[in-house]
Image (spheres, rainbow, N blue to C red):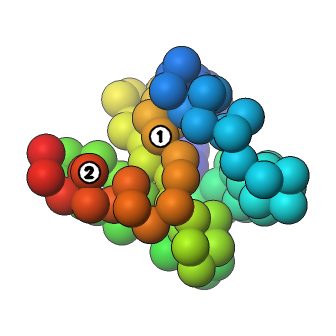
């Protein structure tokens, strides 16, 4: 991404993150580093779902976000069940 991008973590994201197992939290941190360095990193598999964007933490966990200008809002994180919630929006 060109220029400085600010990461903003919503309350829902922070709460969900703290409820994740420690090994998944570690994977989230790794994927966020990839995201910051290169959003096209193949392990992220970023794609659009309705009005939001999703990336893979691993085969079972997903992270949803929105981009508004130079800000990325991380909305939610969790198991693949979270995808169903975003599909219904």
Above or below: residue 69 compared with residue 81: above
- Residue 30 visible somewhere in the drawing: no
Seen at 35% across and 29% down, the residue is 68
- In this rendering, is residue 15 above or below 16? above
Secondary structure of the residue carrying tag 2 is helix
Is 56 left, or right, of 23 in this rendering? left
Quarter of the figure that contains the C terminus: top left
**In the rendered structure, are the residues bearing label 2 and label 1 in contact, judged by CB atoms less than 8 Å apart?**
yes
Query: For residue 85, which numbered disc appears in the image?
Result: 2
Element at label 1: strand
Q: Residues within 10 Å of mark 2 (few under 14, many from 20)?
A: few
Q: Is residue 22 visible?
A: yes
Q: Position of residue 79 (x, y in %)?
A: 52, 61
Expressed as whole percent of the image width and height from the top left, the position of residue 60 reads 56, 73
**Few, some or many C-alpha atoms within 10 Å of disc 1 (few <14, some 14-19, many ≥20)?**
many
In the image, residue 36 above or below residue 43: above
Image coords of residue 37 (percent x, y): 73, 55
Report the mark closest to the observer, 2 or 1: 2
Disc 2/disc 1 C-alpha distance (Å):
10 Å
Of 60 and 31, nearer the camera is 60
Residue 55: where, in percent of width, then height? 50, 62
For marks 2 and 1, the one nearer the N-term is 1
Res 9 → quadrant? top right
Residue at the spot of label 1: 76
Residue drawn at 39 percent across, 62 percent down: 81
């Amino acid at each position: 991404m060109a220029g400085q991008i600010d990461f903003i973590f919503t309350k829902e994201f922070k709460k969900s993150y703290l409820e994740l197992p420690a090994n998944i939290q570690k994977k989230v941190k790794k994927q966020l580093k990839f995201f910051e360095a290169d959003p096209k990193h193949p392990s992220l598999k970023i794609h659009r779902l309705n009005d939001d964007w999703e990336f893979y933490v691993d085969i079972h966990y997903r992270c949803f976000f929105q981009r508004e200008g130079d800000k990325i809002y991380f909305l939610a994180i969790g198991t693949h069940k979270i995808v169903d919630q975003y599909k219904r929006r």
